[in-house]
């Protein structure tokens, strides 16, 4: 018994040791930072730290944007291929589910898209370029007629202001960036051919191996980070594809509706104007306004002011029907961006990459915002993007 008792006593002493070790020691309490570290611990220091971090992020974004502008021959075709592949990826997936080999499904989708793009380009060249001189003359004459009506308005508009606006409009319509010379010349340049070839090749590989490429990019991640990458990729692709398909449907409806209205009113060049409506519909906010203004100017000089007002009413009615009924059904939740965000993205894209940037900026911004919305879960946005309080609408 004594031997057994001697063996049981040491465990009792060892069991009591952790209890004494858990007692807080006075020297273990957290001390306030001293010296240089104290400069960054208060509110002003935290603001300075965040400011430095923000400036570093802005500098990184600026460097990437500058590199993108220097490598437009590669960056722009890759972005176009990414957007187009997201738009027609459901067709490839459908053919694969029906039993078609992956390579055959990719070729069918790619050739279908190339044929459609070639048809659109041919229609633009046929309908717009052949009659661009007449369209430009009609628009400038319409501006002259509009100048006469503006002079009779109750508010004063100086001759210098009118002349300045007319010169700007004439320079735009007669510049090398717009018109038959530009459309015919760009298609013959080596840059256009090279960019188109790069776009087609990259589009082929995106359609064929897009999911595999994304899986390869996610190899370094595991667990929650891997699941986040899957969510972000799927959300971005779905947003890009939905935006392009929805915008194409809306552009077709706008072009057909406005074209029929122009034909009924008797406005000449109805087909070229309808094609311009279709193309400009891919530029949010300002595209429809530009197309409607050009159609109204042509109607003003060709048929008269009353018909021009009818054309304006037709354009406004079509845009209202689109925004009220068609866009919510076609777009759904694809484009949930505030108009101010769209305007900023549109301006930035135009400054960086011209018309191509204006077309691509908004879908890219929408896909980034959609990725943020699923960052922490299928319906859980990133922490900084979560709603913190009830928002009041005034």
Image (cartoon, grey):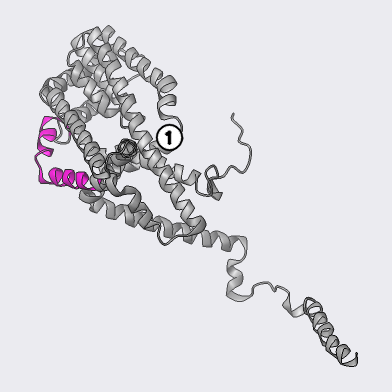
How many residues crowd around disc 1 within 10 Å: few (fewer than 14), some, or many (20 or more)? many
Rendered location of residue 206, percent (x, y) = 28, 47
Q: 346 left or right of 42?
A: left
Which residue in the rendered view is the most extreme toward the front?
Answer: 1
Q: Is 313 displayed left or right of 130 in the figure?
A: right
Q: In this view of the protein, which residue sits in the foreground, 8 or 83? A: 8
Q: Is residue 40 above or below residue 108?
A: below
Q: Quadrant of the C terminus?
A: top right
Question: Where does the image place residue 384, in percent across and percent down from the top left?
Answer: 54, 49
Name the foreground residue: 37 vs 69: 69
**26 relative to 231, above or below:** below
Question: Quarter-wise, where is residue 33 in the image?
Answer: bottom right
Return the residue at label 1.
Answer: 334
Read off the magenta span: 178-203
Residue at 52 percent across and 44 percent down: it is 378
Residue 162 in sight: no
Residue 174 on the magenta span: no
Q: Secondary structure at mark 1?
A: loop
Q: Quadrant of residue 66?
A: bottom left
């Amino acid at each position: 018994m004594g031997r057994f008792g001697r063996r049981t006593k040491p465990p009792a002493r060892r069991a009591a040791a952790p209890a004494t070790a858990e007692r807080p020691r006075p020297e273990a309490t957290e001390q306030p930072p001293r010296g240089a570290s104290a400069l960054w611990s208060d509110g002003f220091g935290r603001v300075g730290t965040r400011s430095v971090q923000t400036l570093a992020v802005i500098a990184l974004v600026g460097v990437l944007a500058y590199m993108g502008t220097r490598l437009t021959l590669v960056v722009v075709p890759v972005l176009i291929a990414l957007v187009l592949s997201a738009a027609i990826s459901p067709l490839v997936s459908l053919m694969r589910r029906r039993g078609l080999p992956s390579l055959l499904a990719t070729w069918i989708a790619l050739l279908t898209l190339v044929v459609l793009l070639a048809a659109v380009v041919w229609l633009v060249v046929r309908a717009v370029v052949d009659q661009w001189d007449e369209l430009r003359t009609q628009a400038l004459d319409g501006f002259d007629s509009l100048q006469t009506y503006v002079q009779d308005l109750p508010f004063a508009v100086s001759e210098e202001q009118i002349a300045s606006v007319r010169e700007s409009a004439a320079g735009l319509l007669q510049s090398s960036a717009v018109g038959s010379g530009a459309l015919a010349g760009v298609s013959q340049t080596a840059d256009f051919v090279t960019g188109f070839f790069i776009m087609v090749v990259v589009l082929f590989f995106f359609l064929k191996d897009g999911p595999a490429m994304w899986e390869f990019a996610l190899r370094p991640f595991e667990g929650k980070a891997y699941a986040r990458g899957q969510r972000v990729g799927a959300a971005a692709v779905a947003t890009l594809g939905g935006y392009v398909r929805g915008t194409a449907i809306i552009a077709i409806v706008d072009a057909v509706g406005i074209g029929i209205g122009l034909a009924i009113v008797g406005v000449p060049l109805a087909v070229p104007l309808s094609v311009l409506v279709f193309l400009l519909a891919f530029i949010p906010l300002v595209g429809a306004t530009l197309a409607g203004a050009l159609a109204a100017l042509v109607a003003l000089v060709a048929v008269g002011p009353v018909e021009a007002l009818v054309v304006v009413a037709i354009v406004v009615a079509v845009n209202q029907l689109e925004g009220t009924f068609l866009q919510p059904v076609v777009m759904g939740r694809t484009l949930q961006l505030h108009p101010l965000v769209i305007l900023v993205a549109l301006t930035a894209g135009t400054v960086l990459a011209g018309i191509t940037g204006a077309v691509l900026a908004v879908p890219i911004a929408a896909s980034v915002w959609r990725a943020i919305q699923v960052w922490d879960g299928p319906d859980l946005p990133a922490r900084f993007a979560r709603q913190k309080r009830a928002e009041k609408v005034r």
